[in-house]
Amino acid sequence: MNKVFNKIDSIVGNVITVKASGVSYNELAEINTRFGKSLAEVNKIEGDTVSLQVFAGGQGISTGDEVRFLGHEMRVSFSDDLLGRIFNGSGEPRDNGPALTDNLKPIGGPSVNPTKRILANRMMRTNIPMIDMFNTLVVSQKLPIFSISGEPYNQLLARIAMQAEADVILLGGMGLKYDDFLYFKDTLAAGGALSKTVMFIHTASDPTVECMMIPDMTLAVAEQFALQDKDVLVLLTDMTNFADAMKEIAITQEQVPSNRGYPGDLYSQLAARYEKAVDFANSGSVTVLAVTTMPGDDVTHPVPDNTGYITEGQYYLKGGRIEPFGSLSRLKQNVNGKTRKDHRALMDAMIRMYSSYKETLEKKNMGFSMSRWDEKLLKYGELFENKLMDLSVNLTLEQALDLGWEILADCFEKDETGIKSDLTDEFWKTK
Amino acid sequence: MTENKGKVLSVNGNLVSVEFSGSVSMNEICFVKVENTALKSEVIRIRGNIAQIQVYEMTGGIKCGDEVEFTGEMLSAQLGPGLLGQVYDGLQNPLSVLAEQAGWFLERGNYADGLDSDKKWEFTPTAKVGDTLRAGEYFGTVPEGAFTHKIFLPFNMPQSYKIKSIAEKGEYTVNETVAVVTDERGKEYPLAMAFKWPVKRAIRCYSERLAPKETMETKVRLIDSFFPVAKGGTYCTPGPFGAGKTVLQHTTSKYADVDIVIIAACGERAGEVVETLTEFPELTDPKTGRSLMERTIIICNTSSMPVASREASVYTSVTLAEYYRQMGLNVLLLADSTSRWAQALREMSGRLEEIPGEEAFPAYLESYIAAFYERAGYVRLTDGSFGSVTIGGTVSPAGGNFEEPVTQATLKVVGAFHGLSRERSDARKYPAIDPLISWSKYECVIDRKKSDFLKNILHTGDEIGSMMKVVGEEGTSISDYVTYLKGEMLDAVYLQQNSFDPIEANCFTERQRYVTDKLVSILGSDYSVKNKDEARQFLNRMRQRFINWNYAEFESEEFKRIEAEIDELYNEGGGKLSHEAELLLKGGE
């Protein structure tokens, strides 16, 4: 039932309108242009005027080009053959492998019934103390990494991909610099993780509309693996580019913008992607880690702001370190009560002390004299930053906890820590 | 059902325009026939013979010319026994039934009745043939968990009716006829235990609405002692993300002193609902000794579920709350988060191409928010008993900035404001309610004068703290410094509360009164400390003992032992009660 139309009414940016009938919402079409074929998706119908967003962009499309409606929505092929492969936002291979067309699954499907989910309660170890000890990552969690351009967020992501306990890794790159794409490919290959990885990559030079498809393609594949009892880790970078792509299309279509030009449904659109993170009852799981760069280091920018309200916490990557303030894993209490009984109390006390250290540091920088208490805090802060916060530290959770007690004992008396006495009695490292 | 049909003209996101021929009413429910299913939708604008409808589902696949069937009914909730313990989506479809029908995913076009139509309930008539009934009066009861569920004459029957026949005591399903009534003209109406009520209309079948007086205990010290909420009152909890809005509501839903809790998870995370679902059946309600789930209803329209039903979910939940209030019960509705609901309004408004107000929110935002909170209230029912609906809504202001439209519109209509601050949550102070900006118009559980006295210490302590940042510790007098430390201690031992510890989290009124008396005496005293280091050490030790005290069960041996330790330390520090504190404590006795 392929319907062919060849009267393109308007071409504005990446959106074209066609006079056509019998077309359904979100249907896919193929356009033959002088530069080859491109996919397009219906995103508005008004009577017989159909708007489509063209994946390859509006450049070079002629009003006489042929538009062929395919009668189905966007789909992605799913099988174990995907492992080790790299695709673009239209689902075409980016490596030199064959195109996959078997077992096509729709993307952007409905959300999981909440009664079919189970409580996230398995820790995902990464051996990064600032994650494992202070903001534990939990299987099926969705967490953004808030960062700014220039920070080593892709390096952090690659390291987590190598060290985290996951059966399958999916990498979705949006607006990725070509160098970064190569970095991921090479690092994962060198670490032997490429064979359990599937990549959907949109680089900065690819058409905008393809960028918008990346999260849906990636998550649709992740969901299928999870239903085959696999624990899947999805890494997305960078979600701000995805939001900007949406903004571009929305503005092109003259939608009323809500905040700094972003469409009013930014929250719902982001949520629909992040909520794909799931732990299925009696089956696999999807965990999502997504880099969100904050334009101008401003966390109140609409993209990080809306993201923060959706996700289960966030990691702040700043100055090459995961910041203890602001960084938060909301699900950590589901797991950190079961690791070791001193985990929670120690974590809270150390953060509280570090916060006092920051205040003292401020006083010191303003030239005030330091009391004995201040001196203790200063010593503590320095030890904490060097021994635990540094991103290069690679310790198991238990080693990190022991180190924490050592640092406290090095700087304070038991009474000064605010930890319940029965814990200090048991774990205090006497000098 | 009227045979009223229309045809799809255009599709834009979840907004569909339909051409119709008969008559169509505003907010009427209709179904768009697409592929093999029919998608539930609501009419939100009518112009000439074109109705614009919002579809409660994803709209992929809809074609121009598809058939639309109008039902003539407004979006309604089914009211009757069997609501408690259920988990619904925003349109009152029980999620467990949907899971049986469709498996892992929420497939579109899949709907189910709100109440189980096969389950039998033990009906006991309380009225007899010949009795007259008005809307809001009941004619029978059914036991539902720990409650006596009243069976009402439906609220939408406007006259007075005579009972013509009524069923014997026995077991019936919700849809079986249990009574027949006649109106003044003799027309007969069969009545079942369940009936429908349009969710966007408030239920007003009570005699009188009264001012909320009685405090609703939440067991959160900071709320009950300083910024209380009254039964039948309203409060809001705005805060930036990660400040602990949801955790606070979760704790409140567990410990609040009410009969029924309705949790409206509106546009928030699915994981949080799962948490409640896993945890609540295991916990016991101290009031009834039964599972906590039996007093809870969850309406969950999480962020990835369609946005139009997110808007509906808020109304569905408040309708269920009002229904249970009619039975003389105290109901708490926790809406998380009202900002997502406002955003749902904004999305639709944008698609309708309405002229945008501030931050593109529609101009009617304020009146919608006000109308929602006004559905709370403490009422005297027609039989003389009292019931209440308390509404607590979280607000998620963009960028954590309280100046935005949703927060401001909400603050105008609520009775208490619990503002969460990023600073407090970053410093891991739970609950992160900022005592310096929050307020409440209701009565607190402790003596108001003591509450003010302690709040004053906080304020003064904070002022000295910010001054110290400028002049340094050495520029601060020792008495000021001690006041500053006292403020810090009050914060650490009383305002902060560990919600994971069962004893610490459940701090009931009697304990709050006892502990605040102790705090008034300790913080209202002068000590013989020589220098600042000594003062800090002393109050740190005091703080440590107080924290241990908080974890001890009230009036247990351990509780008394630690209290003795505190008194001992007090004497050791040469504590001398100030005149003001002495008067306060005397007044309390």
Image: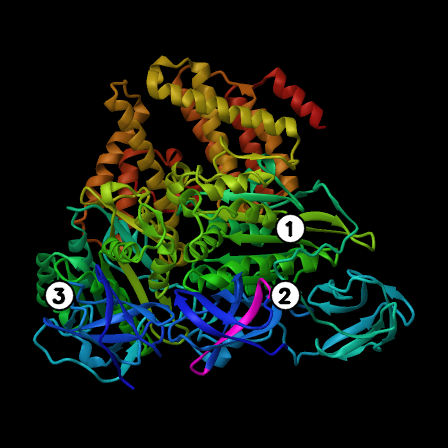
How far is disc 3 from disc 2 in space, using C-alphas?
61 Å
Stretch in magenta: B25-36
**Up-down relation of residue A245 to residue B565 (above or below):** below
Is circle 1 on the same chain as circle 3?
A: no
**Amino acid on which the number 1 mark rests in the picture:** Arg
State the colouring used for the structure image: rainbow
Q: Which residue matches tag 1?
A: B375
Asked if the residue under mark 2 is in contact with the one under mark 1, i.e. CB atoms within 8 Å, the reply is no
The residue where tag 2 is placed is B84
Q: Position of residue A127 (x, y in %)?
A: 23, 56
- Report the amino acid beneath label 2: Leu
Tell me the quarter of the image containing the C terminus of chain A.
Answer: top left
CB within 8 Å, label 1 to label 3:
no
From the viewer's perspective, is the residue at label 1 or at label 3 nearer? 3
Q: Is residue A231 visible?
A: no
Residue A195 or residue A425, whichever sits in front: A195
Residue B209 as seen in the image, left or right of residue A105:
right
Q: N-terminal of the two: label 1 or label 2? A: 2
Q: Secondary structure at mark 3?
A: loop
Per the image, label 2 sits on a secondary structure element best described as loop
Instruction: Please tell me which residue is depicted at 24% across the width and 23% down the height of the picture.
Output: A365
A322 to the left or right of B585: left
Decide whether residue B12 is among the magenta residues.
no
Q: In front: mark 3 or mark 2?
A: 3
Q: Nearer the viewer, residue B39 or B504?
A: B39
Which residue position holds label 3? A60
